[in-house]
Amino acid sequence: MLFEQGQKVVFIGDSITDCGRRDANAPFGNGYANLVRVFVTARYPELDLTFENRGIGGDTARHLDARWEKDVLAEHPDWLVVKIGINDVWRTFDSDGVGAVAIDEYETTYRRLLQIAVDRTGCRLIVAEPYVIEADTADPMRAQMDRYGLVARKLAAEFGAVNVQTQGAFDRALQTTTPADWADDRIHPNLAGHAVIAQTFLRAIGWEL
């Protein structure tokens, strides 16, 4: 188990992290971030960990850049969990490109933000890859998402971060299921879909029953 006594874990990202944490499901949301929180807390109550959810639906790497000071640096995390990239890609397909973030900007911004976080807070990093719940790797959105996922994976390696490979987790699930079993729109998971992400996360940090 990587988390240690008294540490603070901050999650930041888009709607998959947000998951209602700013309204009906405040303050942790009802998605993977809260599942991770409750399973870690239940298994390791002696660690007395603090969790914060700073996800905002619709965010891209560009949006994280605008709020990094307030929502990351000011929180002084011991662990920073970043899951971003879905909207950077999706806006190309659902908004005629309005708000999409090109892959070069995504990589440059993401790297800079991670470096600032490490330099300013000394935090350790957990990088969760973006995904689309689609088994056909030739699907245009899936193919583009894979490229962004590889950027996230590369940055995780550069920073010695824990890498949560969410696309691979859904790919394994899709060997015997359909995308609709996990999400209505291939993006926003139902509770079982969030459990797929949380389970992958827990394995990555060494959680044991």
Image (cartoon, rainbow, N blue to C red):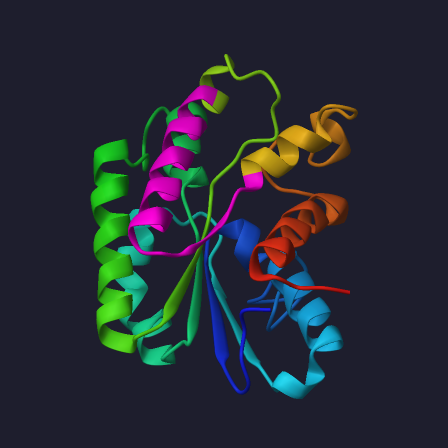
Residue 37: image quadrant is bottom right
As for residue 131 lying within the magenta part, the answer is: no
Image quarter of residue 117: bottom left
**Residue 140 seen by the camera:** yes
Vertical side of 3 occupied by 180: above or below: above
Q: Main secondary structure of the magenta part?
A: helix
Instruction: Name the residue rendered at 58%, 34% in the picture.
Output: 168
Q: Position of residue 72 (x, y in %)?
A: 35, 70
Q: Residue at x 63, y 49 (%)?
A: 200
Q: Quadrant of the N terminus?
A: bottom right
Q: Is residue 204 above or below residue 172?
A: below
Task: Determine the residue positioned at 69% across, 76% down.
Answer: 41
Residue shown at 55% from the left, 35% from the top: 167
The answer to which image quadrant residue 104 occupies is top left
Relative side of 88 to 168, left or right:
left
- 32 or 175, which lies in front? 175
Judging depth in this view, the residue of 190 and 131 nearest the camera is: 131
Q: Is residue 185 visible?
A: no
| Part of the protein shown in magenta | 143-166
The location of residue 133, given as percent across then percent down, is 61, 30
